[in-house]
Amino acid sequence: MEKVVIIGSGCAGLTAAIYAARASLSPLVLEGREPGGQLTTTTLVENFPGFVDGIDGPALIMNMKAQAQRFGARFEYALVEDLEPADGFVRVKVDGNWLETRTLIVASGASARYMGLPRERELVGHGLTSCATCDGAFYRNVPVCVVGGGDSACEEAIFLTRFASKVYLIHRRDTLRASKVMAQRALSHEKIVPVWESVISEYLTDEAGEMRAVRLCNVKTGGMTEMEVKCVFSAIGHTPNTKPFQGKLDIDAEGYLIQHKGTATNIPGVFAAGDVADHVYRQAITSAGQGCAAALDAERYLADFE
Ligand code: NAP
């Protein structure tokens, strides 16, 4: 019987692991499909307190993991498929096997969303991606586009200017949702060209199946145009990773876990933290804060229980 199992190894999961490990609870972290979470696909993080000159996203995550390990947190690369409440504990199905734990912290985060157009699955890796840090360097001296109008879209577009000849920023409205500083940085960059009030209606590929262009639809006029791009970077937000918990944990209309009191979910001993339960703030620091809160809630639950 485990004392604390943590699902997810992003900011929330790792902070929960640091706190639970320091409380001598020897947490087991199930790393999930995207170990390290969203910060592993970003570059410089400038707004995490304590780093005057910013810190690289992957470095921040590696530091958090090492910090958790120093206090005895254990890590396994494993995928969670199901969970069910039992008498005083929770059963979690992991890669086909059930494990038992007194408390569970769900910090499974959120995954990048795509536009929902035909052939999307087969195009990922062939000119369609959601990670400029991972794939940007493949597209040197060619035009690319980023879809979205938030901080992620601006950040991706700015990063891509290091490689691409031109970065089209395709947004469905005529103003960006991004913070002022990010929007200004993106719009003032000579390589970034905003394409307002437009959405992609079709991906166009070459004989080898690689992206060669997109068909754009102007949402105001309905007019269609073709734009030559070698890669489309999707930055239209994220979907919370709550699939394995459907029908077990309370989930809101947008798919996020519902926290009832503090980080507690509807199942006793199960707590939620980070982007899987937050569609308002979604920052590295708020996720870390929630991970801390969930570990403290789990610790108190265990103390009451014993
Ligand atoms: P977001 O703020 O939710 O922005 C998503 C963007 O995609 C919006 O502009 C939205 O358009 C557009 N969009 C959504 N669905 C679409 C669709 N089907 N087709 C076309 N466009 C679509 O997501 P985000 O940019 O990933 O940011 C998430 C959170 O992380 C935010 O709180 C942000 O501040 C934070 N973040 C911070 C930083 C930083 O501070 N360095 C970096 C990245 C992210 P509408 O505007 O019309 O809704």
Image (cartoon, rainbow, N blue to C red):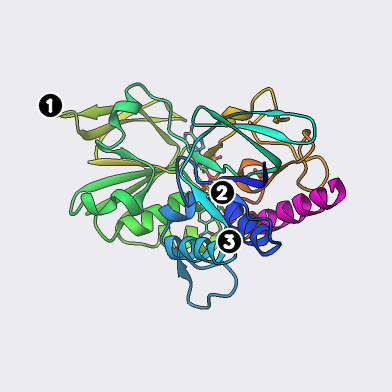
Point out the stretch of residues depicted in magenta. Answer: 288-306
Determine whether 263 is above or below 83 in the image.
below
Residue 180 picture location, percent across and down? 55, 60
Q: Amino acid at mark 1?
A: Glu
- Front: mark 1 or 2: 2
**Could you tell me if residue 60 is visible in this image?**
yes
Q: Are marks 2 and 3 in contact (CB under 8 Å)?
A: no
Q: Are marks 1 and 2 in contact (CB under 8 Å)?
A: no
Camera-side residue: 179 or 139? 139
- Quarter containing the N terminus: top right
Distance Cα–Cα, label 3 vs label 1: 52 Å
Query: Residue shown at 79%/49% (left/top)?
Result: 302
Query: Residue shown at 26%/52% (left/top)?
Result: 166
Q: Report the side of 56 relative to 100 (left or right).
A: left
Determine whether 132 is above or below 55 in the image.
above
The residue wearing badge 2 is 29
Residue 214 picture location, percent across and down? 28, 32
Q: Which mark is residue 72?
A: 3
Q: Which mark is residue 207?
A: 1
- Front: mark 3 or 1: 3
Which numbered disc flags the more N-terminal residue, 2 or 3?
2
Which numbered disc flags the more N-terminal residue, 3 or 1?
3
**Could you tell me if residue 10 is visible in this image?**
no
296 magenta-colored = yes
Camera-side residue: 229 or 208? 208
Which numbered disc flags the more N-terminal residue, 1 or 2?
2
Query: Residue shown at 46%/69% (left/top)?
Result: 55
